[in-house]
Image (cartoon, rainbow, N blue to C red):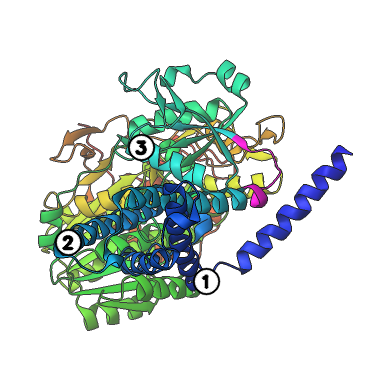
Amino acid sequence: MKKLHTNLVDYLSQKSRVFFRKHSLPRWMVFAFDGGAVILTFLFSYILRYNFELQAFSFALAIKQSLLILGVFSIFEFIFRTFSGLIRHTTIQDIFNVLLTTTMTLFVLMVFTFAGQISNWKAVFDIPGSILIINYVSLNAVLIIARISIKMFYEMVSVKSAVKKNIVIYGAGAMGVVVKRVVSSDAQNEYNIVAFLDSDKKLQRKNLDGIPVFNPTKLSSSFIEKNKVETMVFAINDILASRKREIYSFAVDLGLEVLQVPVISDWLNGSFEVKQLKKIKVQDLLSRDPIQLNMKRIANGLRDRTILVTGAAGSIGSEIVRQLTRFNVGQLILVDNAETPMFHLENELLEHFAHAPVRTILADVTDQFRMDRIFRDFRPEFVFHAAAYKHVPLMERNPYEAIRVNVGGTTIMTNLAVKYDVVKFVMVSTDKAVNPTNVMGASKRTCEQILRSRANLGGNTTQFVITRFGNVLGSNGSVIPIFRKQIEEGGPVTVTHPEITRYFMTIPEACQLVLEAGFMGSGGEIFVFDMGEPVKIADLARQMIKLSGYEPDKDIQIEYTGLRPGEKLYEELLTDHEKTLPTYNAKVKIAEVADFDHEATLSKIVSLLNSCEKLDDKELVKKLSAIVPEFQSSNHLYETSPKDSKEDSVELEVYPD
């Protein structure tokens, strides 16, 4: 019987939702209803005033006076548009407009009555004050009760029978109150608000819109279990990112789903709706306080400049492009050899940055003839070199490609920068270039040496700058999209080692600092970014599993596969011999690196590039290790003895600090 009743309720609710979705009261019908209510309540006021003795007053006069009242009421109803809203979604503002309309009507009628009594106007203008008051009260009651009744009926028949989620709202300020009221007024929402959490002691132990406010320390496993809380809505925008991260992490560790309210500028048409609540991402658990950039210096440096970006369709390159569109640059030349990503980037720029003077070019940085023509045709003044192969396992199996693209491409680009008098050349490097244990890291270390050699040998006016940072969250091929795909497929989530750690930044953070570093120093510097604290990849995997609504090691397993060839257990931003010098931006430091024989190094690099097609993989890696003495391959296929490295690097002189 109970099941039959539930099925019947669900059926009627579904039919009602379909009906209300397809139909709504026309405005003329609402206007007609309000007008009818005016006449009927006025006649009722006369009858009530005269104790239901119909012979005690002139019914014809009452009709004429009701039409006068209807006319005045209609004028104010048009002014305040009380008939134009959807009755089933009546708000406090709608009720206020009704009261405003009836109050203004009463005021005008009182003026008519007073003027009519003084000037002996016709009896139709002489309406007893008691009848006007009775009519005012009864008309408001009818109009307001009717609207609220329709709204309640709609909510009752349209609400789903499913059990709602119990939620807490973190933040009892203005934003939290908005969330509470929007959630409460939305019949289709799936949330039941249990409590507010706020650190303001003045609000604690009080009720806000009928909901208790607690100290955030109240949120615990026992509180969650007792109140069956499943979700926390974070409703504070004016808060440090570091503090927000702590709150998010705490809630996720308690097993709560965490939703966040978008910033006001992202609200739909200036109004917040429940559907805008979004689950937090793992990036939110790793975010830091906003980077403060010297915007004036960057803007002045880029104004009217022609800027070339290589690897423009990649994760880093495309974000550098987005950042550059904020400034009044002369022209943006975007180079990449990946056709489909370049196509998508071009469409994005046309849609969102149509004002930017952009030219997209399909080209390979290792094609010297093609790149020379691009430099000759466009004469770039700034170059942001982000084109590179970056995936460690792939490059470990393909050292020729790592050398051809990373080392060869950088060599060609720096040669052309000197040839065409580029003002500033900024290369994106990686923390894997520090004490490299893999081919990719060694190739990027070689690229750093190319730029430093160019800067120190003189004979050119180009300022060569190196930016070095760790992993970027969400970039192509990074752990986050890989973990996300594994979680969607039900696991397992694979981690190479339980203790492996990595530094992380968001892509916008990294690219903002690349721009900032581009206007520091005079050339030859290696700028190291403040990456915060290293993150355990296993912890990152667990957080992503929890954010997806699963329990690690129960719903989705974490499997450890062992370190891959060339992979480090932890990354470094500096070698053992490197220290840092501060800059005006606390998040950007200059690495004090050991000097070396720049001419000899460039000579060895040219020799490597000229012979790489003739050498097998092991010989290539051996030759690479001669250029980068600190390169100690952890891949047993490429293990080189100290003697081998020394013999091949006799021309190199490394001077420690």
Q: Is residue 273 placed above or below 291 in the rendered structure?
A: below
Type of amino acid at the residue the image marks with label 1: Pro
Residue at image mark 1: 26
Q: Is 161 part of what is drawn in magenta?
A: yes
Check disc 2 and report its element: helix, strand or loop. Answer: helix
Please state, as top left, top right, bottom left or bottom right, where the N terminus lies in the image.
top right
Q: Counting residues from the N terminus, which is met first, the one under dot 3 or under dot 1?
A: 1
Q: Which of labels 3 and 2 is toward the front?
A: 2
Please state, as top left, top right, bottom left or bottom right, where the C terminus lies in the image.
top left
Q: Which of labels 3 and 1 is toward the front?
A: 1
| Residue 656, label in figure | none
Q: Position of residue 348 (x, y in %)?
A: 40, 71
Q: Is 635 part of what is drawn in magenta?
A: no
3D distance between C-alphas at marks 1 and 2:
38 Å
**Along the viewing direction, whichever of 456 and 569 lies nearer the viewer:** 569
Type of amino acid at the residue the image marks with label 3: Ile
**Along the viewing direction, whichever of 267 and 288 lies nearer the viewer:** 267
Callout 2: 10 Å neighbours few (<14), some, many (20+)?
A: some
- Left or right for 220, reference 130: right
- Left or right for 461, reference 246: left
Task: Look at the numbered discs 1 and 2 and tell me whether their residues touch, using CB distance below 8 Å.
Answer: no
- The residues colored magenta run 156-165
Type of amino acid at the residue the image marks with label 2: Ala
Residue at image mark 2: 115
Residue at image mark 3: 236
Callout 1: 10 Å neighbours few (<14), some, many (20+)?
A: few
Check the image and name the residue furthest to the right: 1
